[in-house]
Amino acid sequence: MAQEMWTEERPPGDFYRILDPDGELETEAPEMDEEELLQLYRTFIATRVLEEKMLNMQRSGEVSLVARTLGEEATPLGGAAALQPDDWIFHTYRQTPALLYWDRPMVEVIASATGREPETIAEQLDTEDPAVNFSPDYTPIGTNVVNGVGAAMADAFNDRDTVTMVFTGDGSTSQGAFHDGMNFAGVFDVPAVIICQNNQWAISEPAHRQTGSETFAQKAAAYGLSSARVDGNDVFAVYEKAREAVERARSGGGATFIECVTYRMGAHNTSDNPNRYRDDSEQREYWEDRDPVDRYDTYLRNRGILDDDTETELRDEIDDQVADAVEQVRSISNSEPDRMFDTTLHGESWRERHQRAELHRELNGKNPFVDFTGEGFNE
Amino acid sequence: MSNDLDRMELNTDVEIDPQETEDIDLITAVNRTLHQEMDRDESVRLLGYDIGPLGGVYRGTEGLLEEFGKNRVIDTPLSENGIIGTAAGMAMRGERPVPEIQFMGFFYPAFGQFMYAVVKMYKRTGGALEMPMTIRIPYGGGIKALEYHQESTETYFIHTPGVRVICASTPAQTKGLLAASIRNDDPVIFLEPKSVYRGIDEPVPSAEYTLPLDEARIVREGSDVTVLTWGAMVHQAKSAATDVDADVEIVDLRSLSPLDIETILDSVSKTGRCVVFHEARRTLGLGAELSALINEYALDRLKAPIKRATGYDVHFPGHDIEDDYLPDDERARYAIEAVMSYEF
Ligand SMILES: Cc1ncc(C[n+]2csc(CCOP(=O)(O)OP(=O)(O)O)c2C)c(N)n1
């Protein structure tokens, strides 16, 4: 099991870091004011509370499946914090902190997990768009990389100074679409930042099953991209490297690939049981000692920015926010069955009209198949 | 659910003792069959991600890594195109790979290799190169999962020459069809209805046996109307048949490509009425082909137009209305009643 202990070829300690595991600075902290520092903290806590709540909702059958960010929050958070309003994020199911940092409404995050039709959700929620743009979240992995690069190409062609940030998993780097995206990013020098959230597992497959290279960061070289390898549990380190990459992208310096080394503390998602394929006691301990929230919490307290009162106040505020969002989600009615036909194509075809009518008849306890002339159900 | 064993025609040289059976579900039948085939033929290798220590997300490959080692149960990088492409290379060199695609909706990245290498090699070498491989794919809805985890897009495969498309509906069918697929020298898409994985237990012979890869199965004989169906819908059709005022014949196609056209035409010619009942979207679903075939070769026997009770031409919907999308015994019953009510 020696190799399983470090699922990567190179031990995780070998990377760029600012905040040590005890929350002490190793080098200079990024330039951020107190409000910005607290905003990071708030997002950390909000993510934990929200995801915990969603987990409960999954257990009670309100949402079908939940994939958590537990223990890897600093990666999407540090990355997202490096963006500016009007930039774009292309994400998957494991970047909740990026959504919350830019105030993507919690109610949308929860509602999209309830399996209702997007039209139903959109109609019944009165929410505002966040300052940073988000792609829809992607289920098929790897796809978002090449899409994000295309979006960045569009910005380049139009001389916009928008930056696109793409999040992908370590497992997803095995997909053709990842390599297609990296290659186009290099050839077209696109204003993009591609972040590999290397949590070392893709469901049951450890990172060394995804690549024969020593690190994921090395992949950038083959495509002509700048790269960095950072401690994915150190929000400052991720932020700092992401900020440099965003600046480079915005100033015409092309794309950067950042590997953020972190660890999936829990299951892949709520239908997974990691005890079947990993004995992670040693790894878990190592990463628990490096918990991104604890580290950051210590740092803020040492600097006198956070104390128990502020924390309690903030947690109360977040609890209320989450409770509010859940209540709103519960007030969204179920989708009307024929919503399934909406937004398939613009305009309405014969088939669509006909199949809608069939569905209605079926729902009303009438036989949908009695049209033998193609004239529908005029009666 | 009743067992089909008594009606099952076993196509095997081995004497089967019907007493020696084991009550198992469909996914266990997959597992037993993989075990059996790996035992009997060293060139059988499994490929896929999550198939090793995890034993597959549905446990189809559970225990096989321990039994056969990592060169027989190959845990791959997370790349469908890589899995199918390397399986093709192995098949070209005399191996008999059995790749697993985790969900049908994740086959799409593999379409390049599937089209370029897998289905074409036999033809482009004039028969010199065979591509024996069995691509296992769980398909279909009914489990309230995320998008792309519920696809029933077998039409893409059926439309493609050079590949067999097989769909099993019960544990006993699964064992015989999967073994036959693995032993067959053509590439096979082997579809497993995942809503049935743990749904039905039935006695499955412990001995080795195969079932024909090109014959449909009469699940239930009847004289009024033929229901053509496969996979999970076989069970819905059976339930509908007991609930209508008609003598229903149910044909489980088993082989979606090539089709057992004789059995299909014989049945429809006998009953004079036909309902095609499938989970896939309607437009260019297999029902379209079946309906055209019957029209071409059995029109004069028809007492009613053929009806297709199917999924709608939409993306698989969110799970709050999934039940409204999916065909069920009620939809099958309506279609049967409609064709029974028709008079030319
Ligand atoms: C094309 C495709 N194949 C398979 C899947 C099923 N699947 C979903 S997530 C996942 C593992 C992804 O691992 P990784 O990229 O490391 O991201 P993580 O889940 O660890 O954040 C798999 C196999 C999918 N969603 N898309």
Image (spheres, rainbow, N blue to C red):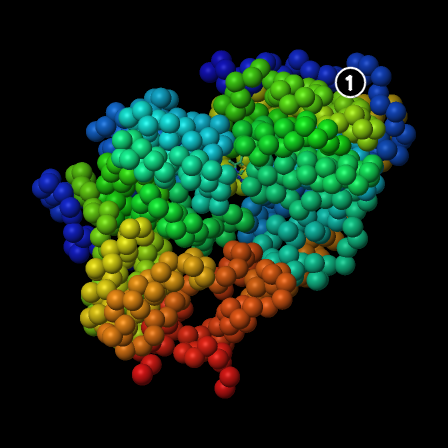
- Find residue B67 and report its image quarter: top left
Residue depicted at x 34% and y 65%: B292
Quarter of the image where one finds residue B177: top left
Q: Is residue A247 above or below residue A318?
A: above
Please tell me whether residue A377 is drawn above or below residue B45 in the rendered image.
below
Closer-to-camera residue (A84/A372): A372
Query: In the image, residue A370 lies at what x, y percent?
Result: 41, 78
Quadrant in the rendering for residue B232: bottom left
Between A118 and A265, which is closer to the camera in this rendering?
A: A118
Q: Amino acid at mark 1?
A: Ile
- Can you see residue B52? no
Q: Is residue B280 left or right of residue A323?
A: left
Task: Using the image, determine if residue B159 lies above or below residue A224.
Answer: below
**Is B189 placed left or right of A186 in the picture?**
left
Q: Which residue is mark 1?
A: A18
Question: Residue at (34%, 35%) from the top-left corner?
Answer: B124
Q: Residues within 10 Å of mark 1 (few under 14, many from 20)?
A: many
Q: How many discs mark residues in the rendered view?
A: 1
The residue most toward the right is A33
- Give the letter of the chain under mark 1: A
Residue A152 x %, y % = 73, 37
Could you tell me if residue A167 is visible in this image? Answer: yes
